[in-house]
Image (cartoon, coloured by chain):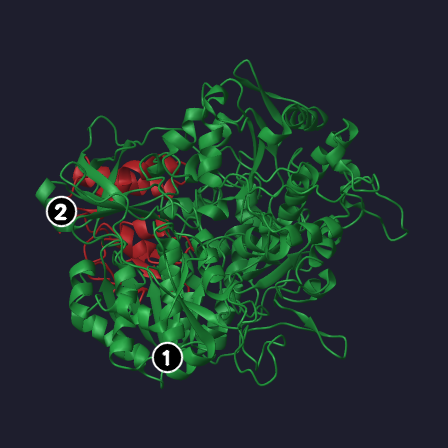
Chain colours: A red, B green
Amino acid sequence: MSVSRRNLFSKFLRPLQAGSKKAASTVGRAAAAGGSGESSPMERTNQVAVIQGRFCLAYQGSFCSVCYERCPVPNAIQLNEGVPRIVLEICTGCGVCHDVCPAPENAILVTERRPGFGA
Amino acid sequence: MNTNTVTASSVPAVSGLDRRRFLKHAALASAAAVAATRSGLTPPAQAVETDTRWDKAPCRFCGTGCHVEVGVRDGKIVGIRGDAKAEVNKGLLCVKGYHVGMILYGKDRLTQPMLRRNGRMEVITWDEAIDVVARRILAAPERFAVYGSGQWTVAEGYASQKLMKAGLANNHIEPNARLCMASAVTGYLSVYGVDEPAGCYDDLDTCDVLILWGNNMAEMHPVLFSRILERRNRGEKIRIIDFSTRRTRTSEFADDYLEFRPQSDLAIANGIAHLLIRSGTYSKEFVEKHCAFKTDTAEHTLDGRPISFADYCRELEAYTPEKVEEISGVPAEKIRMLGELFGRKDVRITSVWCMGMNQHARGTNINRLVHGIHLLSGHWGRPGDAPTSLTGQPSACGTAREVGTLCHLLPGGRVVANPEHRKQSEAIWNLPEGRLNPKPGYHTVQLFEKFCTATDKGGDIQTLFTQVTNPGQSLPNLHKLFKSKQGLEDKFLIVCDVYPTATTELADLILPAAMWVEKNGIYGNSERRTQQWFRMVRPPGNARDDCWMTIAIARRLFELGHPGMKDKEGKFLFTFKNEKGEEVPVWEWERYYDVNVDRALFEEYRLFTRLKHKDLAPYDEYVKARGLRWPVVQQADGSWRETKFRFMEFDDPYVKKGAGIQFYHSVTKDDRAQVWFAPYELPPEVPDAEYPFWLGTGRVLEHWHTGTMTMRVPQLRNAVPHSYVEMHPSDAAEKGFKNGDLVKLKTRRGELELPLWISGRGHPPRGSVFVPFFDERIMINDLTLDAVCPVSKEPDYKKCAVDVQRGSQRSARPPGPTI
C-alpha cells in the first residue's frame, strides 16, 4: 500500500488528543520517525499491542473496527468476520489502536514485546 | 494494566472516580455478561454500587429502540449498561449506546436563554424569553411555524401539535422525520391504507433470507444486525442479500452483494415482479384473496389509479432480466436468482430498508414496489415473511408518525383535510366546532424556502421555532434552505437545543433544553414499540424541558388574550389536575413536576389512537414494561396484550375470525392491499461532463445524525474525528489522489474541501463518492439536492452530481467552528 492510513487522520487527530500524554507521545514519535509523517512505515518499537477480548466491542458481538481502520501499519491488524486480530509479528507497537479505541474500557493493551508476544 | 486512556481526563462534568466507575462497572459489565450468556458460561458477578440507583430508559440515538439501564449517583449519570430484560437488545448495545450517558456532559451545554440584540447573544430570563416568543406569535400567528423532530418525546410532539393545530389553527408544523421517514409512510398508506410495519423485529429471528434494500444495517442498526448474526453463531442458516450502491461493513457479512446504479432499485423490484408473473410462481391464492392493483400516474398522487391484474402484468413486460441489467448494472442471472427466490414457498423472506429507499426521488414508489413483490409472491403474513422499514430516529414512529406532527396530519392517523377527522379531534380537544384548519401547512422543504425568502417576495413564514433538531446542518441544499435566512431582518429563528449547533449560529433566540433522562419521556421505535422513562437527573443551569416551553408559551398567549388558547368552555388548553383534583399551574417551572405532565398528555393522546387500531395502553403499563408494541389491547382478565403481527389472525385481535389475513384499513374498503406498478424513472440530477460523479451521503456507526451529541463524547469523537470522502481507488489513481489528500467536491449548489479516504470503511464503485454528514465543520449538505419525492416530499440525499478536484493545499484543517 503506497498510502498510509495514518496520513488521513493524523492532521486532525492532534488537537483532539491534547489531553492525553500517551497520544501526544505517539504522534510525536510518528513525526520523528517519518519526518512530516508521510507514508513511511513506522519504526518497530519494543512494544506490542494486544486486544483484551473482554473489553473489545467486536468480541462482545457489537460492531467496531476502528483499530483495524486506523492502524497505520499495513496488515498489522486483520479483520475476520468483523473481529479484529493483531498480528504481533507485524505490529510496531505504535499505540494508535489504543488511542482510538472507543470501547468504554479501552480494549487495547500496549505491552512489552517478549517471547510469545511478537519478539 | 495500562489504564492510561485517551479520554480519562477530558470530561469535566464527571470526576475521575466517577468516570473510572462508569467505565469499569457499567457498560462492559453488561457486555461481558451478554457474551458469557451466549457462550453458555455463568455471567460474572456484576459489581453493584450500593449507592447507585439504576433505572430503565430507551437509548437516545437511533430507531432500533434498545433499552439501557442508567446508573445515577449524586445527581449524575455514573453508568450505562445494556438492559438484559429488553427484548429488542437483550443486554447488548452498540458503541454509541455504551456512551449514551456521556452526551449530557459536554462542556458547552446551553444553560441560559439568550436573545440576539444588536448582533450579539445576550442572556435573558425565562420570563422574558417566553414573552418574546408569545409576542412574535401574537403579531402574526399565521406566519409562525414549528419544526420539530423524531426525537421529540410523544408528550413534546403532542403538546406542540395541540398548540399549533388546536390553539393557533395553524398547520405549519413539521418534524425532521419528513427528511427521513416520509416515503415509508406514503408507502404504507398507499399499500395498506394505514401507516407503519405489519411485522416486527421477531421477523428477523425467523426469516431464512434477509434482503437489505440500500440498508447498511451493520452501522445504522448494529444491534439488530448483531441479532441476525447471532443466529449464524448458533448454527442457523440465514442468507443475507445486500443491495447497495456501495460496499459497506454490512456487505462483508452478505452471501450476495448486489451493486446497483442509484435509482435503479425501481427497475430491480419490477424485474422480480416480472419474473414472478412470467414464471407463474406468484401466489395466485394470496393475490386473489388479498390484493388489488394500482399504478402511479404522471401526477404522482398518493391514490394513483386502479388497474386490472392484466394491465399490471402488461406494465411489467418490459422489465426483463436483461433490461434490468442494462438499467441497474446488476447481472441478469442475479435478477433471475431473486425471481426464483421469491417464487419459492419453502423460504421465509424479510426485506428491510431505511434511508436508501426513503431518501429517494421516487421514495414512495420504491416503497410500494418492495411491498408489492412481497404481496405478489405471498411472502407476507407469516413470521419471517415481511417487508419492514426501519427508522433512524428514536421516536420517528412514536411521535412524528403516530402523534402526527406533520403539516397535513392530526393525531392518530387523521388528516386535516378530512372533515370527519377534524370533528373527532375537535371533540377530543373540546374545541368549538370549526376551529381546526382544513388546509395542510407547508412541508419541510417548502417551510424553509418560505422562511428563507424575504416577506415581500412571498416568504410568508416569519417566525420559526425549532426543537430537538439541527436543520442548519441536516437540511439539503443549505445555502438555499437555511443560510439565506441571514440578512432577512424580519425573520426570527427560535432554537431550543442542548448544545451550540449550526442552527443556533443563525438563531435570534436560543432556549436551553433538558435532554433524555433529564426529563420524563416516551418514545416509539421502528417496530411499533412504545417506551417510557422517568427523569433521573436535573438539567444543567437554567435548561428546561421542551414540553414545558411549549406549555409556557401557550399560557403566555392565553394571558395575552389569544382566543385559541381556550377550549369551548373557556378553559386553558393545557389544564392539569393533581390527585386531589386541584389544578396545577405547570407553566410555572417550579410546579412543572408537581404532576406527571407526560402521563396526563399521554392519557389524552391515547383517545386518538383507536381510530386506526393503534391502541395504546395506559401510561402506567409502560412504566412496568420495556416497551409494548401497539395495538395494545386489554384482555378479559384486565391485562394488556401487545400485538407483534398486524393484520394476521393468529396475533392481531382486530382481524375477523376465519379471515386469516385481513387488511382492515384497505384503501379500497374490501380488506385488500394494493400491489403497485411504478416505472423506473431517471433521478432529477445525473452525472454529466461537468459534474461526472455520483454523490451519496449518510451516517457512520460512531456518530449519530449531525454529531451534536456524539462529537461531544471523547471516545466517539476520537474514533471518527472528522468527515471524509470515500472514492474508488482507480478513480483516485486516475486523478492522482492519495489517501488523506484534501479534495474539493463541487455541485451546482456549493463546494467544500475534505480529506479522501480510499479503501476505508465504505467502498463506492467507480464514478461514485460518499460523504458522511455528521461533521459540522464539513457540511456536505451545502452540496446536496433539495429535489423531493413528489408524493412524500422527502428529499433525496443519496444521489446528485458532483465534480471532484484536487483541493487547495493551504490547510488540512476544515474551516468552521470548533466544538
Q: Chain of mark 2?
A: B
- Residue closer to the observer: B792 or B32: B792
Neighbour class for label 2 at 10 Å: few (<14), some, many (≥20)? some
Name above or below for residue B413 compared with residue B490.
below
Left or right: B570, with B755 as reference point = right
Q: Secondary structure at mark 2?
A: helix
**Numbered label tally:** 2
Residue B323 lies, in percent from the top left, at 17, 64
Q: Are circles 1 and 2 on residues that touch, CB within 8 Å?
A: no
Cα distance in 3D space between marks 1 and 2: 38 Å
At label 1, counting other C-alpha atoms closer than 10 Å, the crowd grade (few under 14, some 14-19, many 20 or more) is some
Secondary element at image label 1: loop
Residue type highlighted by circle 1: Asp
Mark 1 or mark 2: whose residue is earlier in sequence:
1
Location of residue B356 (image quadrant) = bottom left
The N terminus of chain B sits in image quarter: bottom left
| Residue B808 picture location, percent across and down | 20, 28
Residue assigned mark 2: B731
Query: In this rendering, is residue B214 above or below B9?
Result: below
Amino acid of disc 2: Asp
* Residue B358 pos. (x, y %): 39, 54
Output the chain of dot 1.
B
Residue located 54% across and 56% down the image: B397
- In percent of width and height, residue B274 lies at 26, 72
